[in-house]
Image: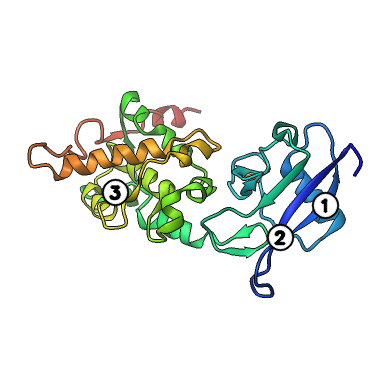
Amino acid sequence: MDKKELDLKIQRFDPSLERRPHFERYAVPSKAGMTVLDALIYAKDQVDHGIALRFSCRMASCGSCGMKINGRPRLACETQVADLRASTITVQPMDNFPIVRDLVVDLEPFFSKHAGLAPHLVRKGDPQEQESPSGEYLMTPKELDSFVQFTYCIKCGLCSSSCPTGSTDTLFPGPQALAQSYRFIQDVRDEGLDERLESVDAPHGVWRCHFAGTCSAVCPKGVDPALGIQLLKRHVMAARSPLRRRRSRGGDGAGVFPNPNKELLKRP
Ligand code: FES
């Protein structure tokens, strides 16, 4: 193999035709600034159209190119070949997900778990406001800071693919869904605390997390799901303890306020 060529080793597997995965190697001309996704696209376009992979934005935003690269879950579009400092780049589908074909995994169970934990604001006192908004729910910068990092999740699945609990318990919601649950419980505008705690304080829920911390180590957006899960446990303990008062919802900072920009918007 030429010195300016990469040795790209891709796991291939079609579960409808094969019993087990195998690897195939591709020689890819390397160039400065090349990402692993660039190398995969070259292999697919120029050598083997049959390679199945998923990608879209190519800028670490859509979350579709999650895969295992040299043994670690990463986004292919943000992984520079040069940073890997390896003569061979081995690419495999994410762990903990059923394989559809080659590098494409079935994300349906992942999104079902996300949807199952109600990833949206729950408001009980003002349903009309949800249908016809008349203003904004305000919060302080401090209140926003307490959960804002969890809103950066792009749902790529890397955290869940690295989770040791997820690999042995398919009913465990996983770090992504649990961190999002914390994000909404912590949001002063949300009023769904009771329902949320019922979902997470369950036999396969938050207590299954043993704080391995791999989810946070692999997150490409700097989110710390392991921290979110531990803080979620604290919410559960606080809510279940007879000695502690439950945090009120819809109180200070969560009422509806007229949009301060409305008047500005009306100006010619
Ligand atoms: Fe969108 Fe990589 S292609 S995150």
Q: Position of residue 123 (x, y in %)?
A: 26, 48
How many angstroms separate mark 1 from mark 2 (CA)? 14 Å
Q: Is residue 40 left or right of residue 132?
A: right
Residue at disc 1, CB closer than 8 Å to ligand 1:
no
Q: Disc 1 or disc 2, which is closer to the eye?
A: 1
Q: Residue extending furthest left?
A: 243
List the residue tagged with mark 2: 52
Query: Splitting the image into four quadrants, where does ligand 1 fall?
Result: top right
**Disc 2 within 8 angstroms of ligand 1 (CB):** no
Q: How is the image coloured?
A: rainbow
Say whether residue 186 is visible. Answer: no
Q: Is residue 62 visible?
A: yes
The image position of residue 1, as x and y in percent, is 90, 44
**Residue where numbered disc 3 is placed:** 207
User: Which amino acid type is shown beneath numbered disc 1?
Assistant: Tyr
For label 3, the crowd category at 10 Å Cα-Cα, with few meaning under 14, some 14 to 19 and many 20 or more, is some
x, y percentage for residue 61? 59, 41
Spatial CA distance of label 3 from label 1 is 44 Å
Q: Which residue occupies 35% across, 53% down?
A: 118
User: Outermost residue, bottom direction?
Assistant: 17
Q: Nearer the viewer, mark 2 or mark 3?
A: 3
Q: Are marks 3 and 1 in contact (CB under 8 Å)?
A: no
Name the kind of residue labelled 3 in the image: Trp
- As drawn, 261 above or below 28: above
Q: Amino acid at mark 2?
A: Ala
Residue at 47% x, 42% y is 215
In the drawing, what numbered circle is on residue 134? none
User: What residue does disc 1 label?
Assistant: 26
Sooner in the amino-acid sequence: mark 1 or mark 2: 1
Q: Secondary structure at mark 2?
A: loop
